[in-house]
Amino acid sequence: MKSIQKIFIGLIVGLLALLVQSSALKFLLPDHTVPNLCFVFVVFLAFNEVSLSGALLAFLLGLLFDL
């Protein structure tokens, strides 16, 4: 049950990172300097989640980023 909670919380954080990256940071920073927050979060997951839930969450965030 804890892995489902981790995936759900990770998806919420990932969606917030995508929303901030695509909307708020484009107004605050020049176009060439907008950081890729989703990538930073996936790298964070790679170092902190070493289970299947981390891999699944990274896959889902990558899929959402491409859509």
Image (cartoon, helix red, strand yellow):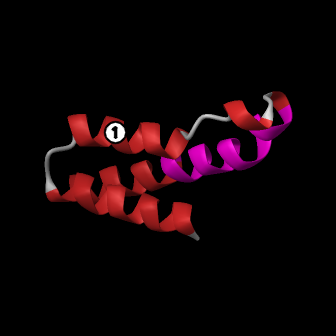
Give whichever of 3, 23 is nearer the camera: 23
Q: Nearer the viewer, residue 18 or 31?
A: 31
Query: Is residue 24 visible to us here?
Result: yes
Q: Main secondary structure of the magenta part?
A: helix
Label 1: how many Cα within 10 Å (few below 14, some 14–19, many 20+): few
Q: Is residue 47 above or below residue 16?
A: above
Which corner quadrant of the image does residue 59 belong to? bottom left
Q: Quadrant of residue 21?
A: top right
Secondary structure of the residue carrying tag 1 is: helix
Does residue 36 show up magenta in the picture?
A: no
Seen at 77% across and 46% down, the residue is: 23
Q: Is residue 60 above or below residue 47?
A: below
- The answer to whether 49 appears left or right of 40 in the picture is left
As drawn, which residue projects farthest toward the front? 32
Chain part drawn in magenta: 13-27
Q: Residue at x 72, y 35 (%)?
A: 32
Amino acid at pointer 1: Val
Could you tell me if residue 1 is visible in this image? no
